[in-house]
Image: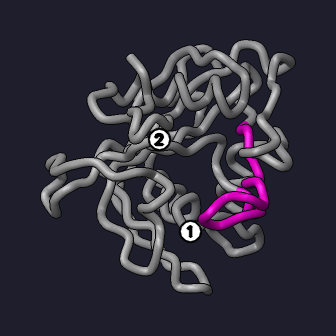
Amino acid sequence: MSVRQGVAGADVERVVLLSEDGRAIGTAPKAQVHHRDTPLHLAFSCYVVDSSGRLLLTRRAWSKRTWPGVWTNSCCGHPAPGEAADVAVRRRVRQELGVELTDLRVVLPDFRYRAVMEDGTVENEICPVWVASCPDPASLAPDPDEVVEHEWTDWARFRADVLTGTRDVSPWCRLQLAAMEELPGPDELVPGT
C-alpha cells in the first residue's frame, strides 16, 4: 500500500484527521496541517532501545515544520490513511533511521497532547507511544532531512534528566516520559533487552 496519495499528478503525504472522540473524519495533506489552528490528527511516537537497554535519541532536522533542531524520542510520524499503526511505525523508522525493529509494542495507546511553539504553530495529536528493539544499532543510517544528530543514552538517566528539567526535549517527549513514569524501563517493556 502506498503511504502517499496522488493529487494533481504529485505525491502528497496525507494525515488522518480525527474527531474529539478519536474517530477518523477525513484526511489532509501533511504539509498543510501544522499551523496556528492545527486540527486534531493521528500520529505516533516510538522509543527505540538496543540490546543493552540504551535509548536512541534524535535531534530533529532544522528544516522540520515543528520543533526544528529539538532533541526528542527516537522517531515520530503519522500513519497514512488506512495504514495499520504498527506498519506505520516500522515504515517510518525504516525511512527515517534506516533500521528494522523487533519486539514492537504499544505502551501508551491513548496518549494525546497539544503543544504550541513560540511562533504560534500548534501540534494537536492523538499519538500512541510505542517501544521497540533495534537488534543492529550499527546499521543506523539517519536521513539528514529528518535527523540532524542522534545519540544512544541510558534510559533511566535520560528520563530522570527530562523529568527534573535538566534536559530539554520536545514537549511531547517530556509529556510521554511523565506518563511512562509508572511503567517499567526498557528492560521490562521490550523483551530481549
Q: Rounded to the nearest whole Å, what is the CA distance between mark 2 and mark 1?
A: 27 Å
| Marking on residue 12 | 2
- Give the x, y percent position of residue 15: 37, 46
Residue in view at x 41 percent, y 41 percent: 8
Residue to which mark 1 is pinned: 171
In the image: residue 25, left or right of residue 59 = left
- Give the x, y percent position of residue 27: 28, 48
Badge 1 density bin: few <14, some 14–19, many ≥20, Cα 10 Å: some
- Image quarter of residue 7: top left
- Give the x, y percent position of residue 127: 39, 50
Q: Earlier in the sequence, mark 2 or mark 1?
A: 2
- Mark 1: secondary structure: helix
- Outermost residue toward the front in this view: 8
> From which residue to which does the magenta span run?
55-71
Q: Name which residue type carries label 1.
A: Pro
Badge 2 density bin: few <14, some 14–19, many ≥20, Cα 10 Å: some
Residue in view at x 18 percent, y 52 percent: 22
Residue in view at x 75 percent, y 34 percent: 54
Residue in view at x 67 percent, y 58 percent: 64
- Mark 2: secondary structure: strand
- Give the x, y percent position of residue 151: 84, 43
